[in-house]
Structure formats: C-alpha cells, structure tokens
Image (tube, coloured by chain):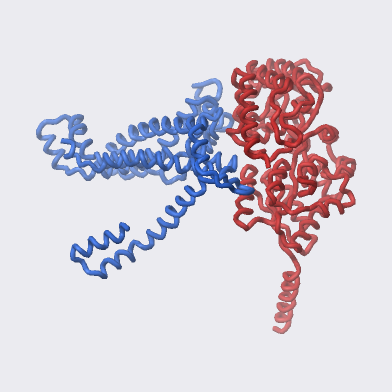
Amino acid sequence: MFLKRALQKRRQAGSDEPHGWLGLAFIAPSMVFIIGLFIIPLVMTVWMSFFRWPLLGRRKFIGLENYAELLGDSQLWQSFGFTLLYTVLVTTAIMAVALPLALLVDRPLRSVGFFRTVFFMPVVIGFGAASTLWLWLLNPDSGVFARLLTGLGLVDQAPRPLESFWPALAVIILMVVWKTAGFTMVILLTGLQSIPNDVIEAARIDGASPFSRFRRITLPLMRNSVLLALILNVTSSMLAFDQFFIITQGGPNNSTISAVFTIYLASFSSYRLGYGSALSFALLVVLVAISSIQLSFMRQRPEDGR
Amino acid sequence: MLKTKLMLAAVALAASASWAQAEEVNLWVRTSSAAVLQALAEKYNAAHDDTVNVTAVIAEQMVPKLGAAIAGGAPPEGAVLDLIYLPTFAANDTLEDMTGFVESLPYADALSPSHIRLATYDGKIYGVPALPDASIIAYNTDLFEQAGLDPEKAPASLDEIVEDAEKISALGDDIYGFYFVANSGSWLIYDFLPHIWAADADILTDDGREATIDTPAMRETLEDYRTMWQAGTIHPTSRSGNGNNAVEAFASGKVGVLMTGSYIVNLLDSNYPDVNFAVAPIPGPTGGQSSFAGGDTLAMIKGIAPEKKAVIEDFVKFYMEPEQQVFITQEAGMPSRTDLAEEAYANFDPRNLIAYDILSKARTPYTYASDELFVSRTGPFLNLIQSAVFGDDVDGAIATAQEDFTKILDRTNP
C-alpha cells in the first residue's frame, strides 16, 4: 500500500520508472527482515493470544479470555507498576549522569579521547554478562564490594542489598547507569557538537554567563538528541529483563519482577504460551502509546512552540 | 605403498561396518545429574558399538526445552527427568510406553517404588528409575556438643529443632542454627513437604487433583519456621538462596541443621572431610519422620525408532548392573535397585543408610502442574512459604495458597 503510493508519488514527481524498481530492490532485503522477524511473529503472537496454548497438550480457542484474565491479574499490575517506577528512576539517573559526562568530554583536550573510551566501554558488554559480573561482585561472602567495605572498616557486616526492595533496586539502577550512561553520553555529545560555535560565541560576547549559555542556548539546541536519548532509554527500561532475571531473580518476595519477566514466567515457568502472548501484546500496546507521545514531541520543531 | 593402501581399506571397511550397525541415541539430562550419567554413558560406550550421547540441560529449562523440542518435532530420543515431571509428560501423550520392558526385567519388583508410581499414568509405565535420592537433615555434631546438646541424639521433631537452633545460634554471631533453601520451589518440595508428610498430612490429594493446604501440620510447621526466623536463628542466605550456597554454608561449620538430601554424605566425605556431622530423617512438627523420594527417571520420547529404543533399553540394563549401581550410590547416595542396597552400601559411609531406611516412608506429590504450583517463582507454593515464614500472617498465607492452588488445578487437571 504505502509502497505503491510512494512509487506513484515518485512517478508524479517526474522520475523515471526504472528508478522506482531500483529503489524497491534496494529496500527488499530490509523488507524481508521486517516481514520475517517482526510482522509474521507479531501476527502469530496475536493469533496465539486467543488460545489456551500449553507447552504440552492440546490448544483450545478461547477468544478474549486471556485478555479478560490479564485485566484482573494482580501480579501483572504489580509488575507494570514496578516497571514504570524503575523506568522513571533509571532514566532520570542516566540523564543526570550522561549529560555532565557529555559536557565533560566535549572539550578540545588531547586526553579527551581516552575519557570518551573509558565512559563508553561498559556499553559494549552484554546485559547478561554485566549482570552476572555484578551479581558476583555483590556476593556478601566472596564479592569484592563486601570485602572492600569490611576491609576498609566502613561496615561490620557485609551488606546484603538484594534482600530488601529499595537497596536491591538501587543496586540495579547503579549497574544500569554504569553500563548504559556511556551510550546516552555519545548521543548527547553528537547533539552538543552539532551546535554551531558562533552561536555560543555570540552569546559569550553578549555577556551571557556559562550557566545561562547552557540553559538558554545549548540545551534548547540539543533538544532532539535529548529526546532521542529519552526515547531509547524509556523503551529499553520498559523492556528490562536480564538484570532482574539474573541479579534479583525477581526477589525479594517477587517485588522486582518487571513486565517482561512476567511474560517470561507466564510462558516458560507456567507454560501458558497463549497467556504469555496476550501479555506481550498488551505490553507492545503500552510501549507504542508511550513512544508515540515522545515521538510527537520530537516532531514539533522548536519554532512551533513559539 | 600397497601395505598402506591395504591398511586404509581395512580401516575404511571396519569403519563402514560399525557405522552400518551402530546406533547413536541422545539423552537429555539435567545439569545436576549430568556428571553421573555422562560417566555411565562413557562406560557404556567404551564397551559397546552403540553410542549414548548425554546432553546437559539446565534443570529449570528442561521442561520448556524438551516441550519445545517435542512440539517442534525434533526431540532427543530420551530424557532423564526429575521424577516429578513424569505425570505431566505422560498425561500429554509425549512419552513411549515402557510397561513391557519394565515388567520383563528380572528385578522389576526391586525398582524404586516412587519412581515407578510417578511414571505410571493410566495403568501404563512411562519411565524407569535412573538416579534416586531422598531428603534428610544433616546436623553438625561439633556445634551440637558446644551448645550442650547430645550429638548422638538427632532432633526428633521440628519443635525440637527450633529449640536446638536457638541454643546453637547463641554460640556466636556468625553461627546459625538452621539452614533451608527458602527461595527455590524445587528445594522446598524436597525439604519442606516431608515435615507435612511426617505428621500424616499432605498438600495435595493422592490423585493430584485437589489442594489440601489448610491442615494443622502445615500451620504448625510454618509457625515453627517463623519462630526461627524471628529469633534470628536462620542463616541469612537462606531466605533469598536458590541452593547454591547451602552445602558451602554447612561445610564452613557455621550451620547447626541443614535441610538437604542423601547425596550430602558422600559429598562431605570426599570434599569436606573435616566437618563432623550426622544425618537423620526429616521430622514433623511434633514427631514422625518422612522424606521426599526424589531423583531422576529415564523416559523415551514417543515415536522413537525401534533400533534406538533397543539401545536405550540396553543402556538401562547396563546401569542396573551391580557394578554401576555401586557407582551410582557413590555419586547420588542411593542405588535405584533396592535388592542391591547391601552390596552398594558396603563400600561407603554407613550414614548413607539413614536415607535409604527412610525411603519406605518417603513420598512424592503426584501432580500434573508441578512447575506452576511448586517451582514457579511467583507460584502459590513459594508465595506461601515466603509470606508465612518471613511475613506476619500465617493464616492469611494459607488461605491465599489454598485459593491459588485450586485455581491452577481447576485449569490444569487433565
């Protein structure tokens, strides 16, 4: 549909026929990927969500029953609430760390490349590996943190942060900030560097203080990269799974079970593939809604607001 | 030159001859049992033309992976499963009927009864015992002595354990009276349910179709655990533990009583010879004894080729031989043939016999929804233990569990 319309538009614009088909040839590989890895699985997920679909045994069409159950599933609402809380906290924390880092490495110093590398380095580690690493560091009996804190005499007993909710959440946020702030820093740095130098110079000559230069010139001109960083962080936090699966294992007492974790438990612990599909689709709807709101902010040109 | 050619031809011929006859079968086993079964398979392969390949699968991924492989039409020929999963797989028509084979074995009557019971569905037998084990308590006799308790006399009730644990914890700030793995459903079925059975109660009806959570035995057991938690006599890694630190904690000599399994005796003997301990049956709140008859059952996946079926049956006969049964006893603490017990135990620590003797009173819940009810992290069984022991409303926790169990059973009963 879209493709046909696009091709028609090209034709109306006076371009030659062959160009249209050449364009199609160029996008064909990605279309195969999108159809094969996104559209087909999505349609199958929706299809499965209308069934009672156990791992073993017969499946049965049950219409919207899974969705009806989902609305009354207290575990699901708790996990959605927790995921939102986590998303708000972790996104704020990442932005609060990444922005100063970006400003710090946006200098024409010789050593700046070294620092950019250091800050970016944790990004290349996978979430699974990073979580396992932190779990090991946090071990109260053999972990480095415990040894360090007791060795320096700061505490008598090795801390056990994973045994209560807020410390467990704090540890996870710390880990995620360590691991992902570098990525956000790079996005913000791109925004920073696209600001023409003469604008800042002009403000400086006009006598604007560093703080007001940052607030009135730099930040507004970085708007799109900040929004992009927010969209990426919010999306990935809403889909967080590995860190909770590995580090807290949903504990203590099921308080750190994220939305995706709930889907995992329904599908691969209770083997309710139909219900798991319904949960996945519900999460997709929520995510699309949040992302569209964010994207609509990004599409407004700064001038529109004036 | 000619000699080389001749030799090559001979080798090729030999290779193709054995290739034409020898069969290869794949067995999936859970990681905790992989070392033993791998060793058994290697012994078997060395003495036979056929090959048994053992693939280790992480225990908690066994059911989803096997289920997906069966659904996808590419399952292994056989699997060695935690016996508790047998009813689920059998009821869903995914396993090969082994009734004829089991009945043809000369020692059929001596096969671990719990394994056969769990492998039986609709009058047919779908598996043979591979590795049995039973749950017991281990207690540190040095700590018992230091706390002024009689190390010769094992605690005869959970109430007694509560008192002992308090005295042991009083020895010092790093010493704790009690250790149980509170955050793993599979451990809790194994180590917690025997308290209930010892008091002649149960959590499910015999046919696995109804929940019977609300019993005096359950309430007393939970109260005892709660008392220990509030008195601070339970080791701190107990609560969030998944079992990885349990043996280590006990072996460090700082835990009085550990809820564990039959394998602990030979494991401590070989890895931690300095720990002085004794083992005893798991008691009920006010007395009695019971155990979880656990371990692994070997099953064949439905649709297996007859030639491959023959290889697996041959492998089963091989590991049922006295020599292999002794090896299994060394690794798991227990033979799967009861008629070989004396022979198997003769070489090992006599403390192994405690677990063996309790087997006649041991039970296993027969259920079609073991994972959803018992193993799942958000499942009703884990919720019951966590909220009753570490929370403050035992009655509320029991009522919620009864309700949640019933909801799941209504949906999953075949």
Is A125 left, or right, of A191 in this rendering? right
Q: In the rendered view, would you say A45 is above or below B249?
A: below
Q: In the rendered view, would you say A49 is above or below B203?
A: below
Is A90 left, or right, of B322 in this rendering? left
Spot occupied by residue B351 in the image (x, y as percentages of width and height): 83, 33
User: Considering depth in this image, is A152 or A238 the residue closer to the camera?
Assistant: A238
User: Considering depth in this image, is A19 or A189 the residue closer to the camera?
Assistant: A19
Spot occupied by residue A154 in the image (x, y as percentages of width and height): 49, 21
User: Which image quadrant is residue A196 in?
Assistant: top left
* Quarter placement of the N terminus of chain A: bottom left
Name the residue: 38% across, 59% down.
A31
Inspect this view and state whether residue B28 appears.
Answer: yes
Name the residue: 79% across, 26% down.
B200
User: Considering depth in this image, is B187 or A17 the residue closer to the camera?
Assistant: A17
Is B280 left, or right, of A210 in this rendering? right
The colour assigned to chain A within the rendered structure: blue
Inspect this view and state whether residue A129 appears.
Answer: no
Name the residue: 49% across, 51% down.
A44
The colour assigned to chain B within the rendered structure: red
